[in-house]
Amino acid sequence: MRVLLVDDEPPALDRLTAFFTNIPGTEIVGTAANGIEAQAAIERLRPDLVMLDIQMPEMGGLALAGTLPFDERPEIVFVTAFEQFAPDAFEVEAADYLLKPVRLDRLRQAVERAKRRQTGRRAAHQGLPVAPSNFDEALWVPLRDGQTRVPVASIDWIEAAGDYAMLHTSLRSHLLRTTMSALEKRIDPAELMRVHRSAFVRLTRVVEMRRIDKWLLTLVLSDGAEVAVGPNYAKAVTAALAE
């Protein structure tokens, strides 16, 4: 996968460059310091994936993404220090949204998602049959005056709340009338793992695992949330975190 790095901060470029040396099947083909440079580099280099900062001089990442025809553009993963742009990023069909400082495990996950999307788009363009996904890419949550689309990729964890499920993202929480069993059929376990009969967690958000006693574990997430791990899920969760 040919990768273009776009950021106006040299340390951020250096960090990504170092990380990509640890991701097999990727090659950095160029860098750019703003949207204008990136626009020219995309046309010249034809990368498969663009790691794109949002706030840059001359032209920001969101503005650049809006100029690229969706059917012809590379996959885009936004990289930023600001959480508030996530809804806009998914509106322009970004493959993922990473917060600085980027972690290697989270970057690997974003690259794999971009690869899957690229494979599907190429197969569709060539008229080849595309294996249908059994999982939802987003959940539609009712509002007082309509609905809002919550990308699964933006959800950090989910907890049961009576007859509802609370979907926690980095920006806000959403209440959806559904059951945990129904969500388990709709959500890719590689995205959100069920860790309790009443909870799902994105394991890349876990910063600490605490053992309360022999049978009880608690996961501490990057936002400070603590999620209990059910005894029946503990072995699988521990193994997944050790990978």
Image: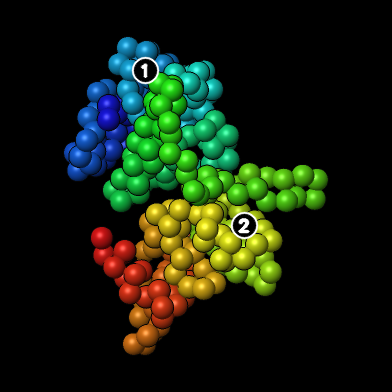
Marker disc for residue 191: none
Residue 224 in view in this figure:
no
**Splitting the image into 4 quarters, where does residue 21 fall?**
top left
Q: Is residue 205 left or right of residue 135?
A: left
Check disc 1 and report its element: helix, strand or loop: helix
| Label 2: how many Cα within 10 Å (few below 14, some 14–19, many 20+) | some
The mark that comes first in sequence, 1 or 2, is 1
* Residue contact at pointers 1 and 2, CB within 8 angstroms: no
For the rendered model, the colour scheme is rainbow
Whole-percent x, y for residue 82 in the image: 49, 43
| Amino acid type of the residue tagged 1 in the rendering | Ile
Q: Is residue 101 left or right of residue 84?
A: left
Look at the picture and state if 225 lies above or below 80: below
CA gap, disc 1 to disc 2? 36 Å
Check disc 2 and report its element: helix, strand or loop: strand
Marker disc for residue 42: 1
| Amino acid type of the residue tagged 2 in the rendering | Ser
Residue visible at 47% across and 44% down in the picture: 133
Query: Of 230 and 17, which appears nearest the observer?
Result: 230
Whole-percent x, y for residue 119 in the image: 37, 32
Residue visible at 42% across and 45% down in the picture: 99
